[in-house]
Each structure stands twice: as C-alpha cells, then as structure tokens.
Image: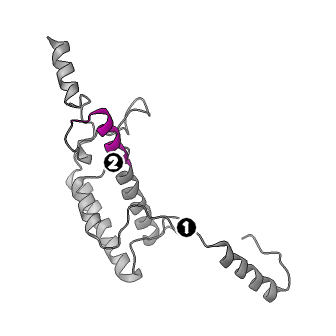
Amino acid sequence: DEAQHTKALQQIGFVFEGRTNPQPNMEKNENWMKRYQELIEYERINGNFNPPSTGRDVNAAFSIGAWCDNQRHAYREYKALLKVFATKYPNHPHIKPEDIASRKNAKDPKESGMTYFISKERIDKLHALEGFTWEFRPSITPFERRLEEYIEFQQKEEHGLVPQH
C-alpha cells in the first residue's frame, strides 16, 4: 500500500523533494578555484583570510571579500539546514550540502533549501586553510579609540566639527 510505503520512508528520513541544484559545471568550478587561489594570494600579501567585502572601490580585494562572504553564508546556511534535517529526520544519515535542493528558483521563498551553493569538497578546501574562519566579522573600532581620534582632531583643528565626507 502506497501510504504505508510513504510512512516507512518518512520514518527513516527519506527526502522526497527532488534535487533542483545541479552539480556545478566545470566552468563554475574553475571560477571557484580561481577565487580560492586569489584568497590564498590575499593571505600571502596581507597575512589573513579576511579581505574587505565592503567599500567604495570595486577592486580585487573587494570582489574576493564578497566571494568569502558568499562562502561563509553558504556554510552557515548548510549548518542551519543540517539542524533542521536532524530534527525532522533523526534517523537520516549525514547530508552533504550538494544533496540539499536549491531554493533560488522555488516558487515559495520560505521553501527549505539552500540559496548559495557550496559542496563538501569546497568546505574541506576552506577548512584546510589555516586561519580561515567561517564566522568572520570585521572588528568594530572600540569607542575608546574613536574618542581618542576625536580628541586628537579637536586639538589639531581647534574645533569639534568633524566633516562628514
């Protein structure tokens, strides 16, 4: 009976939704590897894997920073979905990110799935970079340092009207 089969599959955590996120083609993988190499070069020059992702100039550091943000976002999204799957399907084996459907073309934006693509291989490559962190947040200049800068400005300019440009 079909209902019994469905119930049995649900109990073992079978994922009924079809995969809509095809494996990245060679060209996309080559682009990813190019960015990965740029990140390694950035670290060689700057001593860290945290290129800026915001700024006015669109340059190599900016684009590699945005790329890193996308990798981190995809990884966080994957980890969050693993928690959902573990709750919904407790007996299901570990799911690789490439096995999770994409929701980019989903009709319902709340439909489960990943917005950004990341594969297990890509996660492993980024994990292998000593010093790359998944939860990087640019440090915020402490209030005390900004206060010192303001006092220095006042002393130098003899007023406290800081230009806003």
Residue 89 lies within the magenta run: yes
Residue found 20% across the figure and 13% down from its top: 3
Question: Quick check: 133 left or right of 91?
Answer: right
> Which kind of residue does numbered mark 2 sit on?
Tyr
Can residue 116 be seen from the camera position used here? no
Mark 1 is surrounded, within 10 Å at the Cα level, by few (under 14), some (14 to 19) or many (20 or more) other residues, namely: few
What type of secondary structure mainly makes up the magenta span?
Answer: helix
Which of the two residues, 86 or 128, is positioned nearer the viewer here?
A: 86
Residue found 35% across the figure and 53% down from its top: 75
Residue 83 lies within the magenta run: yes
Q: Secondary structure at mark 1?
A: loop
Which of the two residues, 111 or 146, is positioned nearer the viewer here?
A: 146
State the mark number for residue 78.
2
Q: Which residues are magenta?
A: 77-91
Question: Quick check: 99 left or right of 148?
Answer: left
Q: Position of residue 23 (x, y in %)?
A: 22, 46
Q: Quadrant of residue 19?
A: top left
